[in-house]
Amino acid sequence: MPESTLPKAFRDLEQWLPWALATEQERSNKRQTSTMAEIQAFYDALLIRTEAILSYVEQFPLDNMPEDAQRLFCLTLSLAEVAPAIELFGQPAVLDGYDINRFTMRRVE
């Protein structure tokens, strides 16, 4: 993502911009290549702000969101990606899951 910032009310979350990833594959790779300490820190920081973040981004159409709001929204998608690692698995990888390198997402229109 570009180096510009998050909306003013959420600039305290800028340290987490490396998690503002646009695709599921990028988010999954970030989860699997991060330590549990990194994942836990991100999870803790975002979870307490999720309600405010979603209230903010829902004012924009999903396909016409300002860039700063889009980055904020991508952070919540990464939170959804890491939540099972914290809440269920206790590790970055999915237990008995598929090899992420064999899975390719494609958009069907």
Image: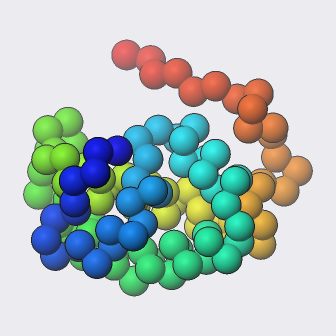
**Residue located 45% across and 22% down the image:** 107
Instruction: Determine if residue 88 is in view.
Output: no
Toward the top, the furthest residue is: 109
Image vertical order of residue 58 relative to residue 14, above or below: above
Image vertical order of residue 15 relative to residue 98, above or below: below
Residue 44's spot in the image, x, y percent? 51, 81
Residue 101's spot in the image, x, y percent? 75, 32
Along the line of sight, which residue is nearer the eye, 57 or 40?
Answer: 40
Along the line of sight, which residue is nearer the eye, 55 or 3?
Answer: 3
For residue 6, what is the image quadrant?
Answer: bottom left
Toward the right, the furthest residue is: 96
What color scheme is it? rainbow
For residue 103, what is the image quadrant?
Answer: top right
Image vertical order of residue 91 relative to residue 3, above or below: below
Along the line of sight, which residue is nearer the eye, 39 or 87?
Answer: 39
Image vertical order of residue 47 relative to residue 14, above or below: below
How many badges with numbers are in the image? 0
**Residue located 62% across and 71% down the image:** 38
Quadrant (top left, top right, bottom left, bottom right) of the N terminus: top left
For residue 72, what is the image quadrant?
Answer: bottom left
**Residue located 46% across and 57% down the image:** 19
- The answer to whether 27 appears left or right of 86 in the picture is left
- The answer to whether 30 appears left or right of 11 in the picture is right
- The answer to whether 81 appears left or right of 36 in the picture is left
